[in-house]
Image: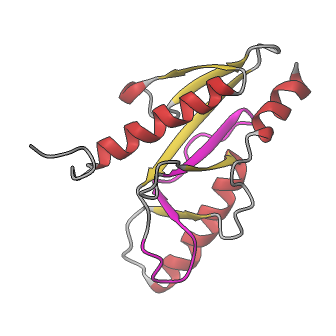
């Protein structure tokens, strides 16, 4: 029998784990959260703050850790951002092979700006590149930045 820590995680396992970890963290921070599964393409979780009833939408991107060949922090791969809204946030999860994931909570406008700028530079030297984008939080500016969600809801509540 294979123990759970010997099991090789699939992309689906990694993605689902990230969504449920994020949902649990939101619940711990006075949000009601629902994981939507694969039926919604633009976001994975819809949540609202219990006190303000302001809704937020969350797009979760998860990774199991990235070998830092280019000396950057963890990266997340994603397709082009299609939906940008004030109440849409990306939560990048690094499962990082430890017991506690790391979370990077970022407004969608920031993700769009960085991924598009990086992609434009990349295709200059790789004209046949695919449509995937990379996101890095090199300075860990957004790590465990849960307050951005709470502040957003309080400002609008």
Q: Quadrant of residue 126?
A: bottom left
The location of residue 128, given as percent across then percent down, is: 36, 76
Q: Quadrant of residue 131?
A: bottom left
Write down the region rendered in magenta: 67-94
Q: Is residue 92 above or below residue 68?
A: above
Q: Residue at x 39, y 43 (%)?
A: 15
Position of 21 with respect to 2 (left or right) is: right
Position of 15 with respect to 148 (left or right) is: left
Check if residue 89 falls in the magenta segment: yes
The location of residue 58, given as percent across then percent down, is: 59, 34
Q: Quadrant of the C terminus?
A: top right
Position of 115 with respect to 79 (left or right) is: right
Q: Residue at x 55, y 82 (%)?
A: 71
Q: Quadrant of residue 30?
A: top right
Q: Residue at x 60, y 44 (%)?
A: 91
Nearest the camera: 47 or 99? 99
Q: Is residue 73 above or below residue 2?
A: below
Check if residue 15 falls in the magenta segment: no
Position of 122 with respect to 145 (left or right) is: left
The location of residue 65, given as percent across then percent down, is: 44, 62
The location of residue 47, given as percent across then percent down, is: 63, 22
Q: Quadrant of the N terminus?
A: top left
Q: Residue at x 66, y 40 (%)?
A: 89
Q: Main secondary structure of the magenta part?
A: loop
């Amino acid at each position: 029998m294979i123990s759970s820590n010997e099991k090789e995680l699939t992309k689906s396992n990694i993605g689902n784990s990230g969504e449920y970890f994020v949902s649990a963290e939101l619940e711990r921070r006075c949000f009601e959260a629902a994981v939507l599964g694969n039926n919604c393409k633009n976001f994975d979780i819809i949540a609202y703050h219990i006190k303000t009833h302001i809704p937020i939408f969350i797009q979760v991107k998860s990774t199991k850790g990235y070998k830092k060949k280019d000396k950057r922090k963890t990266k997340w791969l994603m397709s082009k951002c299609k939906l940008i809204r004030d109440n849409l946030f990306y939560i990048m999860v690094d499962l990082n092979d430890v017991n506690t994931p790391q979370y990077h909570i970022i407004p969608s406008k920031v993700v769009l700006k960085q991924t598009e700028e990086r992609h434009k530079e990349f295709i200059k030297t790789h004209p046949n590149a695919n449509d995937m984008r990379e996101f890095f939080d090199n300075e860990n500016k957004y790590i465990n930045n849960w307050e951005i969600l709470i502040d957003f809801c309080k400002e609008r509540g």
